[in-house]
Amino acid sequence: MLYDMKIGIKTQAPQLNWKDHLAKLQTQVVDEQRFLDDLNRSLSNPDFIERAPEHIVQSKREKREAIKITIEQLNIEITTLKIKNK
């Protein structure tokens, strides 16, 4: 039970449907993977690397690494959720 500070009563914690949460996480992985694919496409284009300002190229490289970490974390959460709810 949670205590709602706004109205001063105890309320039930919302129960997440784990299958809905799993679907949401999987959708996030797909979205992040698309973004990663776009970054990889840009960074593998020699014309882009040659013509873009260095700070833009570096920013895209940093975003790429951050997205890789996010995807890995989402996949761990998905695996954990599946194990807990077998």
Image (spheres, rainbow, N blue to C red):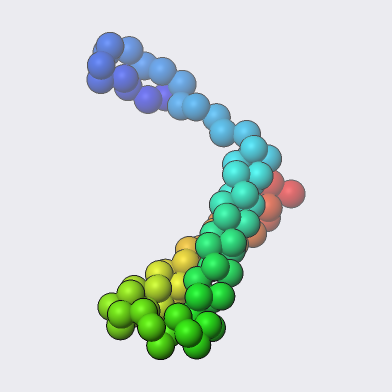
Locate residue 76: give its quadrant.
bottom right
Horizontally, is 72 left or right of 52 in the view?
right
Residue 75, percent across and down? 59, 62
Near-viewer residue (79 or 47): 47
**What is the tally of numbered marks visible in this picture?**
0
At x 53%, y 83%, the residue is 44
- Depth check, front residue: 65 or 46: 46
On screen, residue 65 versus residue 76, left or right, reads left
Question: 3 or 65: nearer the eye?
Answer: 65
Vertical order, 2 against 56 (above or below): above
Q: Quadrant of the N terminus?
A: top left
Determine whether, in the image, residue 3 is placed left or right of residue 38. left
Q: Residue, x 50% and y 75% (percent of image)?
A: 42
Q: Position of residue 60 (x, y in %)?
A: 40, 73
Image quadrant assignment for residue 4: top left
What residue lies at 54% left-to-right and 68% top-to-bottom?
38
The answer to whether any part of residue 62 appears in the image is no
